[in-house]
Amino acid sequence: MRRISSLPPDPPDFAETAGPTSRPPPGTPNVLRFGRHTMWFEPPDLYVISLDGILRAEEILRMKELTRDRYMQASYVLNLIHLNSVGIPSPDTRKVAASDPGRAIPQVFAFVGGSFATRVVTSVVLRAANLIRPGMMTFELFDDEVEARAWIAERRREILEGSSSAPP
C-alpha cells in the first residue's frame, strides 16, 4: 500500500488573478491611471475604481492628490471599487488607505469581487479608518456590480434625503 505524504496543492485563487470586470464607457473623459489601476468619474457623484494587481501606497496617495479638488467641494463621496484582480496590499499600503480620511463628510464604498482574503483585509482596513471618524464611512462587499450600484443608489438617496431634512 502506497502512502500519500501530502495533499495536492490548492488550485490558484482566480479571484485574485482575473482581469477587472469594469472598464470606463467609451468616450469617458478624464480616465485616470495609477500604475495598472484605473479610475473615472461618473456624474453626478460616483467614482469607479478598477484595481488590477497589487495596490501600492504611492498609488493611493496619487489617487487622493488627483481627486482632492472635487473631494474638497463634495458634500459626500460615492465609490464603486472592483477588487477582482487585486492582491493583498502591504502593511504600508493598508496604513495609507486607513489614514487621513479628510473632511468629515459621508463616504460610501461598494466593493465588487475579490477573494475571501482580499475581502477580509478590505473590511479590516475600512473598519480601522471608520474609527477615526465614526459613522462617516459606510461600506459593503458584493459579488455583482448590479447589486453594488443598486446599494449605492440607495445610500445616495438616504444621504440626499438626510441633507434636505437637516436644519440650516
Image: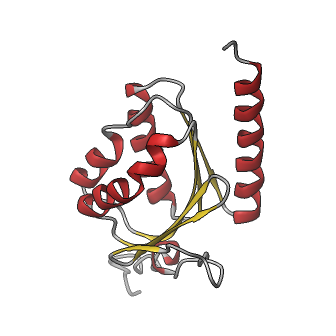
Residue at screen point 46% across, 28% down: 104
Q: Is residue 85 left or right of residue 5?
A: right
Image-quadrant location for residue 101: top left
Residue at screen point 70% across, 33% down: 159
Q: Position of residue 168 (x, y in %)?
A: 66, 14
Image-quadrant location for residue 132: top left
For the image, the number of numbered tags is: 0
Quadrant occupied by the N terminus: bottom left
Residue at screen point 35% across, 62% down: 88
Determine whether 130 is above or below 49 in the image: above
Image-quadrant location for residue 146: bottom right
Residue at screen point 46% across, 46% down: 71
Residue furthest out toward the top: 167
Q: Position of residue 35 (x, y in %)?
A: 32, 76
Q: Position of residue 76 (x, y in %)?
A: 58, 39
**Front residue (pair 147, 103):** 103
What colouring style does the render use? Answer: secondary structure
Determine whether 122 is above or below 166 in the image: below
Q: Position of residue 115 (x, y in %)?
A: 51, 64
